[in-house]
Image: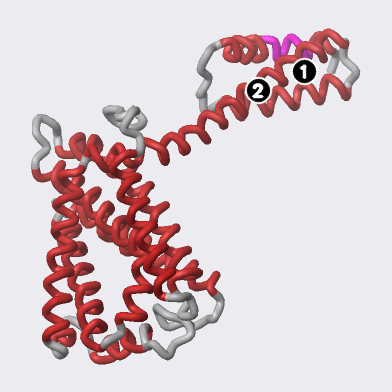
Amino acid sequence: MRQQSFETKHQKQWLEFEASLDEKANTSSHFPHRFRELCHHLALAKNRRYSPQLVDRLNETVIKAHHRFYQHNRRFQLQWLDFLISGFPCAIRRNRRFVYVALALFLIPLLGMAITCYHNEEFIYSMSAPDQVREYESMYDPENLKLGRTRDSEDDLAMFGFYIKNNIGVSFRTFAGGVIFGLGTIFFLVFNGFAIGGVAGHLTQLGYTTTFYPFVVGHGAFELTAIVFSGAAGLQLGYALVNPGNFRRLDALRKAGRDAVSIIYGSTIMLIIAAFLEAFWSSSASMPILIKYSVGAVFWVLVIAYFLFAGRKTNRASYGS
């Protein structure tokens, strides 16, 4: 193709793209496609030995587009950093009334079941089958070299993947139950409270305190907190459906979903951290108990301090708005 025909064919496209690069913000979804087309045109111009003026023009435009493209990606990366520093803890504080309710729905059954099972060794069978109870006892037997769930593999990395899948599954069910007007979330919070409390009380009365509590104290700071936060996000959805105010229910759900989704994103990160600790740290039976308790205490202090103080200077009305 002659150069003049090539320029005539693509001139309008180049002018539009050059004009878009002069705008301060360019978030068009067509940008990557148009950028690739321009790179193709530059390659053709060089290959066909068109005039240096045309090649220089296309080359300068490609360089400007390259800077714009990676500048945009850089902003995306900073958005995630901003989310971790302030967006997530601010979302938790804005919705603290749901967090308090979720905490009560989880903690009260947990403590009640733990105390009951501690004083009545048969009560654990009211919610767990004998095989399950034997599995709990086997998981935290002081004679074990590895603590926690029975392993099909000795590979900690494989257990890391298992814990991620299991933890996120619990979190998602607790959150998604909110769309049933909050009833599903309430059920899963109470059920998980009973289940964890029952195991804790039963193992305590067996005297497995030197294995069970050192196991849970480290990753529990992230895992248990994330379960409560997932419940809070689910309750937020349920409340929007039960009491939509002046909005249609779908609009109220969409409005509540902005913070709820932010909380779930943050909770998922916490659950991945918990899974890592559970697979590589908590499961070790050779680590001195004092060190496990000390590290666990540090994790709890850091988690609580993060949600109390992180992002207070920003304190935006709504993340991403």
Does 187 sit left or right of 56 as displayed? left
For the C terminus, which image quadrant?
top left
- Provide the residue designation for mark 1: 59
Is residue 61 located in the magenta-colored stretch of the structure?
no
| SS assignment at label 2 | helix
In the depicted structure, whether residue 129 falls above or below residue 249: below
- Provide the residue designation for mark 2: 67
Residue 126 at least partly seen = no
Q: Amino acid at mark 2?
A: His
Locate residue 301, reporting x and y percent.
33, 53
Locate residue 299, reporting x and y percent.
38, 57
Highlighted range, magenta: 5-11
Residue at 30%, 50% in the rendered image = 304
Q: How many marks?
A: 2
Mark 1 vs mark 2: in front: 2
| SS assignment at label 1 | helix
Residue 56 at least partly seen = yes
Which image quarter: residue 143? bottom left
User: Seen from this angle, which residue lies furthest front?
Assistant: 290
Locate residue 290, reporting x and y percent.
40, 72
